[in-house]
Image (cartoon, grey):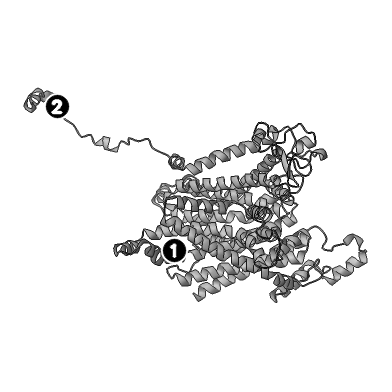
Amino acid sequence: MSTSTNETISKDMFELVEVNHEDADVIEKPQLSFMQDAWLRLRKNKAAIASLIILILLIIMAAIGPSLSKYDPYTQDSSRINLPPRIPGIEKLGIFDGTQEIAGKKVNVYEQKHIKDYYWFGTDSLGRDLFSRVWQGTRVSLYIAFLAALIDMVIGVTYGLISGYKGGQVDNVMQRIVEILYGVPNLIVVILMLLIFAPGILSITVAMVTTGWLGMSRVVRGQVLKLKNMEYVLAAKTLGASNTRILFKHLLPNLAGVIIINTMFTIPTAIFFEAFLSFIGIGLQAPKASLGTLIQDGYQTFQFLPFQLWIPAAVICILLIAFNLLGDGLRDAFDPKMRD
Amino acid sequence: MVKYLSQRIIYLLITLFLISSFTFFLMKFLPGTPFRNQQKLSPEQIHILNEKYGLNDPVPVQYVKYMGKLAQGDLGISFQFDNQSVTHLILNRMGPSLQLGIQAMILGTLIGIILGMLAAMFQNSWIDYGSTLIAILGVSIPSFVFAAALQYFVGVKLQWLPVASWDGFSSTILPTIALAIGPVATAARFIRTELVDVLSSDYIVLAKAKGNSYRDIAFKHALRNALIPLITVLGPTTAAILTGSMVIEQIFSIPGIGEQFVKSIQMNDYPIIMGTTIFYSFVLVVCTLIVDILYGIIDPRIRLAGGNNS
């Protein structure tokens, strides 16, 4: 059997393989950019992806939420105060059905007051619709957080780049300033700043930025110190690249990872700070709504009307958890060695 | 070491000087009146009051006077709280704050260490995921939301513990737990990372090769080395507890410094705001310094000089 097969294979069926040296350099897989690579790794992290989806949903709700409800977030209505949540459809399941425990008995407040409308999240002590107020508040909280994170990023990155790249005496002086500012507890600066500025979206942001950029500048400086001695920077210098070109074309793209990670962690901090300030009464002032002011309002009556506290509190917790998980995921994705 | 120490202390003094100056000038720009019933007072009375509190002097003179007194530990006199001296007020209220802070610090770090250890020893099991979940929740959930939840479920619904009062140990339990949640999360995350690192190092492999039990290795060899870097998080943890104490004390109506600080902000009591700010800054700056020094003593591998890379 074996001999017969051997006979059927003739010599001309063979072909000489020539070694082509150029083929050795061909890369079979598509080349991935830094961002694509990070995305591939992030995609495997279920918690981070779930957080990303939740965040996108919350951002969409913050954008369109207030207009979904037919009530305005600011209109007061004294005949409809403190209504519990009631959602059409779900009310048949026995939750969100507009009932409330009064003196141990379940009472449908809507029927009592002869109200045919549905307030999905109920109303507050001034009869304002909580659904639109919660999303309006989410919008304000997110706006403050993103703005603060953006300004932190711009100042921190610029400061860190200059300090790290210039080095020497410039770095020395700039780092002494940072060291002193670092010693100042940020909460105290924020509170002091808010005492002089009239509380508002802009003043809260400015107050948070005052010391917020320090962390970013430190991280960026550290990276620049490491990167500026790399061969590719030397090569760029030898080829006559200007400082600005090296900074923006060579260093900045390599810093993208740490910058994004740092910003991702600034956002939840800013959301927390805004809520904290509003809770102790020096944040946004009425009638403006933020998640912090809503929690503060809800806290006043939470023993009797718990929904007024739990709904905004749940939103802020989900926001913060999602941002933190996404930040963790991004950190792992950008730098798998740095896991912690 | 001496050079490093003296350098750090100079920075500490500069920081404190800047904070107190900054605070002083900010307070001068504050709107609102410091006196409780300004409307009822005649201009002459206001003038006399201003004279009494030294508010008629030019600002630079007030500044020099204030800084001079500050150096002697005198933080001025409160406008609102019955003319008591601020130093006295702060010292009076330090007890509850200190007690809560220390209880929360100990509880938080202990639970954190246990959670972190369990997570590292049973990596990628449900114990690990559970502990990570607690850590994430602890980092994310604002302390005042957590405090309100505790108050509602344990205090109001179950009625196991007092809702908001200050008498005896039972009234400190809820606020301590609320304050400790942050430190739990920080410590748990930190210990897990450190232990995972340490568990893969050569001397652990050697200990395994010698036939030591897993528990022995984890406790005797790994944990000891993982605990050292935990000292570094004590600084930020102190800051977190200080921050938390303001709202927690307010929520549970505890007669501490934080509660008074929030109250004085709402009442425009400049001297108390200034005094507490400086006091808080002092505590934080000194804590950070102590932590850095301790770390250098315990782990001589850390080079103290420079201090830029810390």
Q: Is residue B303 visible?
A: yes
Residue type beneath disc 1: Ala
Query: What is the number of the mark on residue A70?
Result: none
Residues flagged by tags 2 and 1 on a common chain = no
Which corner quadrant of the image does residue B282 belong to?
A: bottom right
Toward the viewer: A209 or A333? A333
Near mark 2 (Cα within 10 A), the count class, few <14, some 14-19 or many ≥20, is: few
Residue type beneath disc 2: Phe
**Picture coordinates of residue A236, whole percent (x, y):** 42, 47
In contact (CB < 8 Å): disc 2 and disc 1: no
* Label 2 sits on residue: A14
Question: Circle 1 — which element?
Answer: helix
Q: Chain of mark 2?
A: A
Relative to residue B200, is residue B112 drawn left or right? right
**Picture coordinates of residue A323, whole percent (x, y):** 56, 46
**Picture coordinates of residue B52, whole percent (x, y):** 85, 72
Disc 2 versus disc 1: distance between alpha carbons? 64 Å
Relative to residue B272, is residue A330 drawn left or right? left
* Quadrant that contains the N terminus of chain A: top left
Which corner quadrant of the image does residue A8 belong to?
A: top left
Query: What is the number of the mark on residue B226?
Result: 1
The image shows residue B199, relative to residue A130, as above or below, that is below
Toward the viewer: B27 or B246? B246
